[in-house]
Amino acid sequence: MIQFSYESDRELFESAIRFAQRQVRKLVEKYPGFYPVYTQGGVWKHDSPALAHWCDGFLPGILWLFYKRGGPNAADARFWWEVATTYSRPLEPRKTEPEAHDLGFIFQTAYYRWFQCAHEDPIREAMIAAGRTLALGYDEKGQFLRSLVAGNSLFIDIMMNVGIVFYAARETSDRQLREVATRHSLTTRKHLVRGDGSVAQEGLFDPDTGEFLRQATQQGYRSDSCWARGLSWALYGFTTAYEYSRDPRFVHTAESCADYYITHTPAHGIPPWDYNAPGESRKLLDTSAAAISAAGLLRLCRQIADPMKGHFYWSTAIGILRNLCTKYLAGADPGWEGILKGGVYHVHKGLGVDESVIWGEYYFVEALEEALRVMDRGAAHSTVN
């Protein structure tokens, strides 16, 4: 059992949560009904393009995490409940949105967090419908869920979405849905995760035969490089796949990705936007990849059999959060509307580079909430004993 002597970290994380709450309260009050993607010059609402509506679940997910952290008896509980509900309800029609590969990003953030707080059947049913809809994008020949780019394209990002198919399969005992989710995960593991634990963002297949053709990328430096956010998606996504399936191949893949992240990331825990980016470009770091990885490591450390390695993953995640809190919070810049600076959206298109990005905010808050939950439990155990 992990023994906690992290009182300074606990205070740091609680302070970061309070700062995040202040920033998000300002956001929803200044831009009511607005679903942000990335800041421009620290400002959430601007005229630059979002490219796709894959981010709409993150803000309501953050709001539900704030409600969960305080509980129903907190002084601000009613505010968080009402605004979280207000931002979550409009997403429901997307449960049947055709040709989308990002329904997990929407429903596993907003609706899953909502269900944790409300336990109402309509919320659960919306998640099941979203899982069924996502499964309709399954390519039988290639055995993968198609990306929104093309019918013969597989994204590493979809490992963050396949969990909603696993969820629908579990809740309905639908073997076909489970098979789709499992086969997609195995195909991704085979073709996008390399032997050293690095990943490719995209795989391309022959549309007629389903034969794998080559690795590619939309956002990484090269097709054969390792895009940091893609690595983080894989670390977190394969952990989720294991949580639902208990297939040991998935937890081993998650560990491989985690080990690559730890081995190749600087000691401060914040990775370059692409591990193979050259020269000056490699100095551009991505705090959103760090936040996703911290959240993934906090999930992964509970799933592996080796307690020493589990503790190592836990400690690594805490170290990442510590550095995010001390070096990248926007508290010193009163005009900055986000929580975390230093996030990256799309380098090649020049969008959201060295800015706040809403998925970085979500996984940062998720990781903080999880770390504090475990620390609180440890503190309570120590008090009892």
Image (spheres, rainbow, N blue to C red):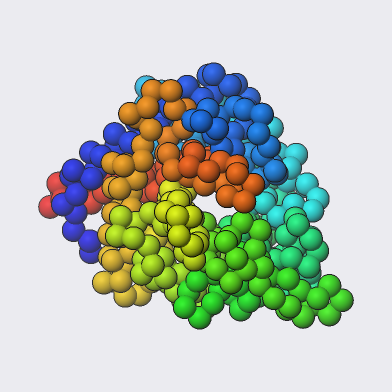
Nearest the viewer among 135 and 49 is 49
Residue 61, given in percent of the width and then of the height, sits at: 53, 40
Q: Is residue 132 visible?
A: no
Q: Is residue 368 visible?
A: yes
Q: Decide: is 185 above or below 66.
A: below
Quadrant in the picture for residue 368: top left
Residue at 59 percent of width and 33 percent of height: 36
Nearest the viewer among 12 and 352 is 352
* Quarter that holds the N terminus: bottom left
Quadrant in the picture for residue 58: top right
Identity of the residue furthest to the right in this view: 208
Residue 151, given in percent of the width and then of the height, sits at: 80, 64
Q: Decide: is 333 above or below 223.
A: above
> Quick check: 235 left or right of 214?
left
Q: Decide: is 209 above or below 236.
A: below
Residue 360, given in percent of the width and then of the height, sits at: 48, 45
> Quick check: 209 left or right of 191?
right
> Quick check: 383 left or right of 331?
left
Nearest the viewer among 7 and 132 is 7
Identity of the residue furthest to the front in this view: 279
> Quick check: 63 left or right of 16?
right
Identity of the residue furthest to the top in this view: 30
Residue at 54 percent of width and 18 percent of height: 30
Residue 271, given in percent of the width and then of the height, sits at: 41, 57
